[in-house]
Image (cartoon, helix red, strand yellow):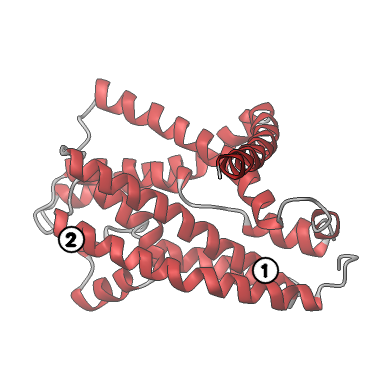
Amino acid sequence: MENKNWKLFLFVMHKIGRFYHVFLTYLKDALEYRSKALVYFMYPLVSTTVMLIFWYAASSTHATGGYNFSFFLSYYLWMMLAGSALMCYAEDAIARYGIYRGDLSAQLLRPFSWMTHVLFAEVPWRVMGGVYSVLIMVGVSIFLFPIQHNTTVVGWTLAIIAAALGFTISFLYKFILGSSAFWLTNTRGLTSLSDIIIMLFAGQLMPIRLMPPLFRSIALSLPFSSMVYIPVAALQGTLGTIELLRAIGIQLLWLCLLIPLQQFIWRRGLRVYTGVGQ
């Protein structure tokens, strides 16, 4: 029995070591192009700045439902962090390089899955985007205004869980979106439409709690709010423990729906994949 346990332990450590070295390769690649990551980070930074200017003007007219500028400052800074660290942008690489150019053919022969390749290639960029966001937030908190955040151990624990689930949901959704290239000759229209929907229903354009009740209910029931809004609300501390547990339950529900859907679309897509690109 001990010999079997030891062999199992060695097997698991070998797997972990192999994945670790693969991840390290992608991390080194991302660090080599860290200036590119900074350019990518400019989009959420500029978007956050524009939204803060708008809500600063709106809060000065007392037309924000009782929320002051401090709330919006904290909200959009946390949203900047979530958009940089939790929102995946792998759909273009999956469609353009993996399927259209045919790089998937070589990846299918490797000892780890295409999904693992995409995940390990994406995570370092999210880490660097998160680092840039944290630096901005620390600077704002020190030199300008304090940032609202969760103040309890339970709240932070649930916020970390919500953030991990949000990233996973985002990754699965974007993987499914990129996999549509198996059937579509051009996915740009679909991805652009997806970006608009995410902007509306993930709380990027405005906090979901400020939406009319009907739209708020719709937004909270869709997977887009689970990607970034729920983690942001948890990190900012605007959700109570019961509300946060309910929100995490919704995230788990979407996770259970997206996993089999991704597997189904992936298997179907491989059947029509030509192996030479398009």
The answer to whether 26 is drawn above or below residue 237 in the figure is above
- SS under mark 2: helix
Residue 179 appears left or right of 199: right
Residue drawn 15% across and 59% down? 242
Disc marking residue 100: none
The answer to whether 161 is drawn above or below residue 175 in the figure is above
Cα–Cα gap, marks 2 and 1:
34 Å
Give the camera-side residue of 35 and 234: 234
Residue drawn 65% across and 65% down? 178
Residue 217 appears left or right of 109: left
Disc marking residue 243: 2
Residue 105: % across, % down: 85, 60
CB-based contact (under 8 Å), mark 2 and mark 1? no
Residue 202 appears left or right of 28: left
Query: Split into 4 quadrants, where in the image is the N terminus?
Result: top right
Residue drawn 72% across and 51% down? 112
Q: Residues within 10 Å of mark 2 (few under 14, many from 20)?
A: few
Query: Split into 4 quadrants, where in the image is the C terminus?
Result: bottom right
Across the whole image, how many numbered discs are drawn on residues? 2
- SS under mark 1: helix
Q: Earlier in the sequence, mark 2 or mark 1?
A: 1
Give the camera-side residue of 76 and 156: 156
Give the camera-side residue of 203 and 103: 103
Q: Residues within 10 Å of mark 1 (few under 14, many from 20)?
A: many
Residue 273 appears left or right of 197: right
Given the image, on which type of amino acid does mark 2 rest?
Glu
The answer, for residue 64, to whether it is visible in the render is no
The answer, for residue 101, to whether it is visible in the render is yes
Give the labeled residue for mark 1: 179
Q: Farthest residue in the front direction?
A: 1
Residue drawn 20% across and 63% down? 210
